């Protein structure tokens, strides 16, 4: 019998010993396993078709890489989830990786949604607009596009050739005469009846043809219209159709990469060099390229291209529409499981147009990786110069920059941006609505922002705080850090000279002389750039808040009229004034407005 004292003295199992013990009790079934450390942090998430066998493989130390050995040594807890199949395990694994971001997994930084072009169907005169997020508006969606720029360019093409309206429904209903878009021949002004509904619906039909990749049919239709106008000796109209044909031909030459059997697909190529990798993806829909994007996954130096690509595909399509086909330059490790889980086909072409397309994507990935590595190298050199210029003990790894923005004390916001040796960390940007401080007191606002940022000390802390301001702002920041017991963060204030000229900035630090950087030095340009980025972000945040406050109306003051009813009223009447002028019966005709609600509105 083991004494209670002996049990107390026994150390909890850790690393290989823990995994050996756990492996004996695991089922021989597919599932997901999570390895945790003493703090409860998830170090690694993996999937397998045999949980017992996979976990046991981590106990064979002579077969593990140095990095995996290091990870295993930190493991103090193992969690598992049994699944019905390996494909189900893969989906759960990738979902967990995106949510938990374990440090030993291959990680893809891509949380943004991708834009679409929406052709609305809520009026007799549909419009086209950019759309992100859930598809909760009735209409036709075309995409996804790689970026907002690709959407904007495509909408401009449609306006120039097909002249579909892009204005909001409220603006459309309120127009009494054509706007500028009509006069520059980018809209046919259906708002004022300058085009019949029948003719406008023909424009809509042709827009759908263009976005569906039926450019050849559209060109044939334009040619028929040109001939018809010529036969009637309407030469000015015939010239307009000719111009449309020429414009469409130029667009086809620029955008179309039509390959038979590749109407809807993503082309994905990976390039790996010097321990880093870049992945290029082309979005092809309806034979048109909807733009491209480059990704730089986070992974270990020794990771294979096949493993990286497998992780990328799994994570990328977790929250995005999946195409029917994917072309790749190397087969991912879990090809069959990915195909089953995502209901797609993965091909690696060896000849022909498809292979040339893959080569193009790989060339783009190669060049992007070179640029990224050069940027990181430049940033590392600049960070080293900043250490020297401000007499820091170590080279900084993370800098946070703060700025405030308001308009005569209204819609006040504080903004924070983060920058590392890899560049701007957009996921680390933060907005702070000023809640307590007086908005005419910049010092108080900065204190509130910094306190709210640093009161949770478990978050990643910066090495430098850069504040747009002088010595007074530096002292306020130091007060906040001291009150919270935070040390080893250098606070620097950046202020322009007497003439407010860029290039003559002065830098302030507690108990130190003013630091002046060489006017045209790389470190001066860098400090100006990150200060300006914080200012841009603060201004953008302030404008967004101001716009949100601006659209508040008298309807917000009526008890019982919530967001849904307010939206229904404004969609029906177009303005608050029209709601005011409506009689009781008309108000009750709006969906969701009862007699009691209508009486409240009239009474208000």
Image (spheres, helix red, strand yellow):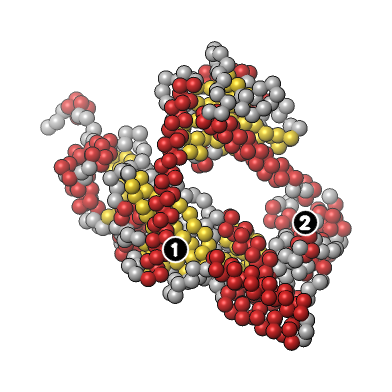
Instruction: Pick the residue in front: 22 or 299.
Output: 299
Q: Residues within 10 Å of mark 2 (few under 14, many from 20)?
A: some
> Is residue 112 in view from this perspective?
yes
Q: Residues within 10 Å of mark 1 (few under 14, many from 20)?
A: many
Which residue extends farthest bottom? 231
Q: Which residue is the site of mark 2? A: 597
Element assignment for label 1: strand
> In x, y percent, where is residue 134?
57, 59
Q: Residue 246 sits in which quadrant?
A: bottom right
Residue 315 placement, left or right of 168: left
Circle 1 residue: 266
Left or right position of 38 against 527: left
Image position, residue 160 (x, y; %) = 68, 66
Residue 174: numbered disc: none
Q: Residue at x 63, y 38 (%)?
A: 536
Vertical position of residue 62 compared to residue 176: above or below? above
């Amino acid at each position: 019998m083991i004494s209670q004292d002996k049990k107390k003295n026994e150390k909890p199992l850790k690393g290989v010993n823990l995994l050996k013990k756990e492996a004996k009790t695991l089922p021989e079934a597919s599932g997901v396993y999570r390895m945790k450390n003493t703090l409860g942090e998830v170090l690694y998430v993996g999937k397998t078709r045999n949980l017992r066998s996979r976990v046991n493989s981590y106990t064979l130390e002579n077969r593990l890489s140095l990095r995996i050995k290091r990870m295993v040594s930190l493991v103090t807890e193992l969690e598992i989830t049994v699944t019905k199949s390996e494909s189900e395990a893969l989906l759960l694994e990738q979902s967990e990786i995106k949510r938990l971001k374990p440090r030993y997994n291959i990680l893809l930084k891509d949380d943004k949604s991708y834009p679409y072009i929406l052709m609305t169907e809520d009026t007799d005169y549909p419009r086209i607009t950019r759309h992100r997020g859930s598809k909760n508006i009735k209409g036709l969606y075309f995409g996804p596009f790689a970026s907002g720029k690709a959407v904007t360019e495509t909408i401009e093409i449609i306006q120039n050739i097909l002249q579909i309206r892009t204005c909001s429904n409220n603006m459309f209903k309120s127009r009494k005469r054509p706007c500028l878009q009509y006069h520059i021949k980018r809209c046919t002004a259906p708002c004022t009846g300058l085009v019949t509904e029948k003719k406008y619906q023909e424009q809509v039909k042709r827009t759908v043809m263009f976005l569906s990749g039926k450019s050849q049919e559209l060109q044939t239709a334009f040619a028929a219209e040109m001939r018809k106008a010529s036969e009637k000796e309407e030469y000015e109209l015939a010239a307009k159709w000719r111009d449309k044909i020429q414009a469409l031909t130029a667009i086809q030459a620029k955008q179309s990469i039509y390959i038979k059997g590749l109407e809807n697909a993503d082309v994905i190529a990976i390039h790996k060099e010097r321990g880093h990798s870049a992945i290029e993806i082309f979005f092809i829909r309806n034979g048109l390229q909807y733009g491209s994007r480059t990704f730089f996954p986070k992974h270990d130096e020794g990771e294979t291209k096949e493993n990286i690509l497998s992780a990328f595909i799994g994570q990328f399509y977790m929250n995005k529409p999946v195409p029917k086909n994917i072309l790749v330059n190397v087969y991912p490790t879990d090809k069959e499981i990915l195909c089953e889980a995502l209901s797609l086909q993965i091909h690696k072409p060896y000849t022909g147009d498809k292979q040339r397309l893959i080569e193009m994507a790989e060339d783009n990935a190669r060049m992007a990786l070179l640029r990224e590595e050069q940027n990181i190298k430049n940033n590392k050199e600049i960070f080293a110069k900043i250490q020297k210029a401000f007499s820091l003990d170590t080279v900084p790894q993370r800098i946070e920059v703060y700025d405030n923005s308001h308009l005569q004390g209204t819609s006040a916001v504080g903004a924070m941006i983060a920058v590392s040796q890899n560049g701007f960390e957009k996921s680390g940007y933060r907005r702070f609505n000023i809640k307590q401080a007086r908005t005419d007191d910049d010092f108080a606002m900065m204190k509130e922002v910094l306190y709210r940022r640093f009161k949770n000390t478990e978050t990643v802390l910066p090495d430098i705080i850069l504040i747009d301001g002088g010595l007074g702002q530096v002292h306020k920041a130091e007060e906040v850090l001291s009150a919270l017991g935070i040390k080893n963060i250098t606070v620097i204030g950046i202020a322009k000279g007497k003439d407010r000229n860029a290039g003559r900035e002065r830098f302030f630090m507690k108990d130190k002389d003013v630091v002046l950087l060489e006017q045209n030095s790389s470190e001066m340009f860098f400090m100006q750039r990150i200060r300006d980025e914080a200012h841009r972000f603060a201004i953008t945040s302030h404008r967004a808040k101001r716009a949100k406050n601006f659209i508040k109306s008298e309807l917000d003051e009526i008890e019982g009229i919530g967001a849904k009813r307010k939206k229904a009223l404004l969609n029906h009447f177009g303005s608050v004034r029209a709601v005011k002028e409506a009689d009781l019966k008309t108000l009750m005709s709006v969906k969701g407005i009862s007699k009691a609600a209508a009486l409240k509105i009239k009474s208000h």
